[in-house]
Image (cartoon, helix red, strand yellow):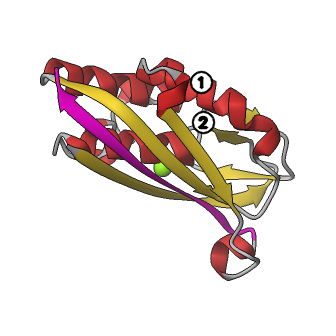
Amino acid sequence: MVGFGYDVHRLAPGESLILGGIDIASDVGTVAHSDGDVLLHAIVDAILGAAAMGDIGEHFPDTDQRWKGAPSGQFVEHAVNIITQAGYALVNLDATLVLERPKILPYKQAMRDRIAELCGLPVERVSLKATTSERVGFVGRLEGVQAYCICELQPR
Ligand code: MG
């Protein structure tokens, strides 16, 4: 079974930029109730989506004190637990980050390692790509960052 996830967060000066669970040195960061980790949010939605188990907002509402200020890695671990209990195993995931800057390449391996750890996958099953928006649109104007993810689940 295949799942797809998408997320976007607004960027502003003076905020932290955390992507794939890794702190990125940047002059702009994500504005969010949570840690604003747009990549992990897209991954959560892909995992939940593959099992037709709703979306990140249903499972981790802003209003639930349990998740207040929680790092997004906890959302990924919880999503993996939910699908595991439902009888599925994650096979692989493939994600794309869209942001104008900074360059993601220096952080990519650390992000893949962290995502693999959170998902209980070998790192070879975690693909991460990054692209700019060619200075076009809200991503191109540094107003936001986007992430897409697709994943496969199989019955355990
Ligand atoms: Mg989000």
Asked which quadrant contains residue 101, the reply is bottom right
Image point 52% across, 18% down: which residue?
Answer: 117
- What is the secondary structure assignment of the residue under circle 2? loop
Q: Earlier in the sequence, mark 2 or mark 1?
A: 2
> In the picture shown, does residue 11 fall above or below 72?
below
Whether the magenta-drawn stretch holds residue 69 is answered as no
Q: Main secondary structure of the magenta part?
A: strand
Q: Is residue 27 left or right of residue 131?
A: right
Q: Residues within 10 Å of mark 1 (few under 14, many from 20)?
A: some
Q: Is mark 1 within 8 Å of ligand 1?
A: no
User: Disc 2 marks which amino acid?
Assistant: Gly
Q: Is residue 64 left or right of residue 109?
A: left
* Disc 1: which residue: 114
Marks 2 and 1 close (CB-CB < 8 Å) = yes
Q: Is mark 2 within 8 Å of ligand 1?
A: no
Residue 126, position in %: x, y? 51, 34
Residue 96, position in %: x, y? 55, 53
Residue 120, position in %: x, y? 42, 17
Q: Nearer the viewer, residue 19 or 113?
A: 113
Does residue 28 appear in the picture of this structure? Answer: yes
Whether the magenta-drawn stretch holds residue 151 is answered as yes
* Disc 2: which residue: 20
Q: Nearer the viewer, residue 116 or 77?
A: 116
Asked which quadrant contains residue 111, the reply is top right
Does residue 37 appear in the picture of this structure? Answer: no
Viewport quadrant of the C terminus: top left
Q: Which residues are magenta?
A: 142-156
